[in-house]
Image (tube, grey):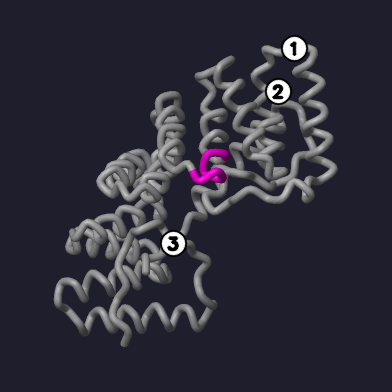
Amino acid sequence: MPALLSLSACTREDKSTAVGEARKEGDANLSTQTPSQPAARSAPSAAVSPEAESAIASATEAIKKNPNDAPQYRRRAYFLQVAGKSEEALKDIDQAIRLDKDNAYAWELRAAIDRSLGRSSDVVKDYSEAIRIKPDDAAQYYARAIANSETKDYKAVLDDANAALEKDPQNKDYLYLRAVTLETLGKHQPALEDCNRLLKADDRYVSAYKLRAICYEKLGDKKKSVDDLKSARALESQKGPSIVIPVQGLGSQPAKQ
């Protein structure tokens, strides 16, 4: 069973980017739903909201008037993806990219669409293009790291986690990603050191206790492993299980106590 990783920081940033860009391109009433979340999958087209239908129709009319309007192709692609029409969304975002290949948001949206279609290797390529355009954006490296975890390229995950941390050293999600990747690669002592950093910054980080328990177990310190599992359970009993999702293939499972 994989270890657990919170994606809350990435999700917040993706949502802000998607909503901000789509609003800028002509829909002030856009809801906060975004197709950029890693776990998102296509929804049935019957669930299309009136707002999405209106936005799609509006973008379609704009494109008829100006077939080279890249922002409107991006806007329509976004709402098609929200509506669960991923194949159509992919066609629109590809056209938007042909018209303007240096728009980072277009590549982020393409990554979301490719993820919904199960095209993990293409998601990595999409985020690589976003990084080309925004090389100082730590969130792009983090997003590509998650995509690399889906293709089980853990060396690439580690490289991207390091890159994200270089740009945002205090980000706990990035540090946890590096820790769980180090543990996956069998580098238990560096992983434990990252867990120590996490818990120094936040002594209620449940997943860090669980991961450190694994590291202690692999390093032969059974007592500290058990103590960390007890700490994690105590915190969970106080506030309920943390909201986390698994990273594909990353992490080990500690022995049951």
Which residue lies under the disc numbered 3? 246
x%, y% of residue 198?
A: 34, 61
Of the 4 image quadrants, the one containing the N terminus is bottom left
Helix, strand or loop for the magenta stretch, by majority: helix
Q: Quadrant of residue 138?
A: top left
Write down the region rendered in magenta: 113-118
Residue drawn 25% across the image and 61% down it: 183
Q: Distance between the residues labelled 3 and 1?
A: 43 Å
Mark with earlier residue (3, 1): 1
- 32 w.r.t. 137: above or below: below
- Residues at marks 2 and 1 touching, judged by CB atoms closer than 8 Å: yes
Which residue lies under the disc numbered 1? 66
x%, y% of residue 254?
A: 29, 76
Q: In which quarter of the image is residue 83?
A: top right
Mark with earlier residue (2, 1): 1
Can residue 229 be found in the magenta stretch? no
Secondary structure type for disc 2: helix
The residue type indicated by label 2 comes to Gln
Q: Is residue 101 left or right of residue 256?
A: right
Residue drawn 54% across the image and 23% down it: 103
- Residues at marks 3 and 1 touching, judged by CB atoms closer than 8 Å: no
